[in-house]
Amino acid sequence: MSIWEYANPKKFIATTTPVIPWAFGGAMLCLLVGLVWGFFLTPQADRFGSTVKIIYVHVPSAMMAINAWAMMLVASLIWLIRRHHVSALAAKAAAPVGMTMTLIALFTGAVWGQPMWGTWWAWDPRLTSFLILFLFYLGYIALWEAIPDPDQAADLTSVLCLVGSVFAILSRYAVLFWNQGLHQGATLSLDAKENISDVYWFPLLVCLAGFILLFVALVLMRTGTEIRVRRLRALERQAQRALA
Amino acid sequence: MKALLLRDLRLAIRAGGGFGLSLAFFLIVVVLVPFGVGPESDILSRIGPGILWVAALLATLLSLDRQFALDHEDGALPLIATSPLPLEAVALAKALAHWLTTGLPLTLAAAPLGVLLNLDPAAYPWIVLTLGLGTPALSVIGTFGAALTVGIRRGGLLLSLLVLPLYVPTLIFGAEAARRGAQGLEVATPLLMLAGITAGSLALLPFAAGGVLRINLR
Amino acid sequence: MMPELGKYAVTVLSAYGVTLVLLLGLTGLSWRRWRRLKAEMDRIERGRDG
């Protein structure tokens, strides 16, 4: 019994289908508790006023935006090395989720920046990096859509993901070098207690768990959908060949 | 490889290839900018290096999609692929041909066009140096993008969408080095980073482009 | 029940609102596509057995 057995599409669907409702349920529960806790029950911060509550949607979505790309990178590598179709489809399935997370992070960052820095948009390194990440997601999804042959599309997008990752990291450093920026440093390190007090920290953790579960549920579901799309297409082709 | 390079160069210069076209595009963009931002010479001289960089970047983009597409359409690409030359070398040759027909002329044209933007005299050597150092990276990255989209009909727009984000680090370091050089600030770091990106792209991206071509020809 | 948001009410509420709309939208779309394909798949598989 190895983990590669789940690379069998049928087995993947059979195993993950019962997991999806649980993941969704967990995500809903965590998000409900975390967001309600964060929104209604946390005090205002001295410096931020009530805008501190935005942290509960901003930070988890920003984290998932990056993690989604990392997951796509791993899945692409698995596809290129071991050629498991599920892996390629999982990467495809994760891209729109990651893009949505990037969009949320950008939007919440912009509305937060308005009262705090006095501007909707600043060419701050982190904001700029996320904008570039958003462009990478766009290009990746567009390439998937443009190629009709699924295996070829999987190959090409995987290579794009690899090359893109290198350039995304390069861009991150380039942007950092280019402009030092207004963003506060990492508030979410392991010694987070020094930066952010428990009152804000616990609901944030719950929200993080909620976003992670939601991501898992969405990716599993979308991967299952992609598997079925491919299977349907294969069946159609079979039927056409039988007729011909 | 040399034969392929010479052939590409000949094709580019002859049949109305991208050769003159991207230079003309470069000229037009640089001419249009003052209409957009106003004729004040101090503003123009301040944003000049950045304008030249962005315009050069767009001009290189313009001639990318014909790089493999023409060979793909007339069936020359599979023939090239069956030759003893590995596809990685083909990609490198294509990138080199692209640079010789666009990157190099753009670099040389940047200096006279700088006059239109009221560039500070101190800025000229830096613009030429950074463009000369950075355009090879633009060509190689673009070749990778062209190889990626070779099988797609009307891939030109998609090509821009894929390649432009990849151009970001080169643009930042190149324009930053040019700007700092013009103001007499320290330039070693961005210049080294720019050279590093070019060297790294030249060393690694032909392999990615070759692999992608192989996938597309399957 | 509503917490005092002060002068940043619009900011905070719009951030939460947009997040929820985007997440629910994505979930809804994914869910609809999943159900449609599952139904189609089931139909074809039943057709092949029968």
Image (cartoon, rainbow, N blue to C red):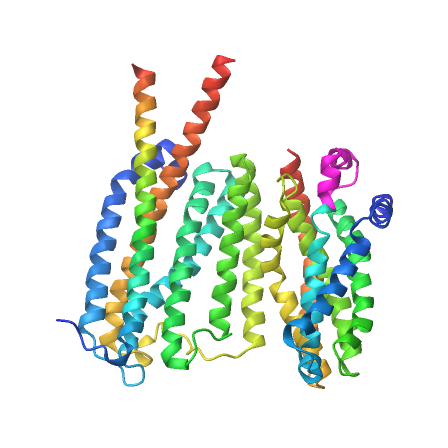
Q: Which is nearer the eye, A117 or B210?
A: A117
Quarter of the image that includes the C terminus of chain B: top right
State the residue at coordinates (46%, 50%). A72
Residue in view at x 39 percent, y 77 percent: A114
Image height of A45 relative to B33, above or below: below
Query: What residue range appears in magenta?
Result: B67-88
Q: Is residue A92 above or below residue A234?
A: below
Residue A56's x, y, as percent?
29, 68
The x and y percentages for residue C9 are 26, 75
In which quadrant is the N terminus of chain B drawn?
top right
Vertical arrangement, residue B21 with respect to residue B49, above or below: above
Residue A179, located in which quarter of the rendered image? bottom right
Name the residue nearer the viewer: B169 or C8.
C8
Image position of A217 (left or right of A86)? left
Q: Quadrant of residue A67?
A: bottom left
In the rendering, at what x and y percent does residue A84 appear? 47, 37
Q: Main secondary structure of the magenta part?
A: helix
Describe residue A162's horizontal placement relative to residue A5 as left or right: right
Residue drawn at 31 percent across, 24 percent down:
C43
Q: Is residue A105 visible?
A: yes
x, y percent for residue A230: 44, 32
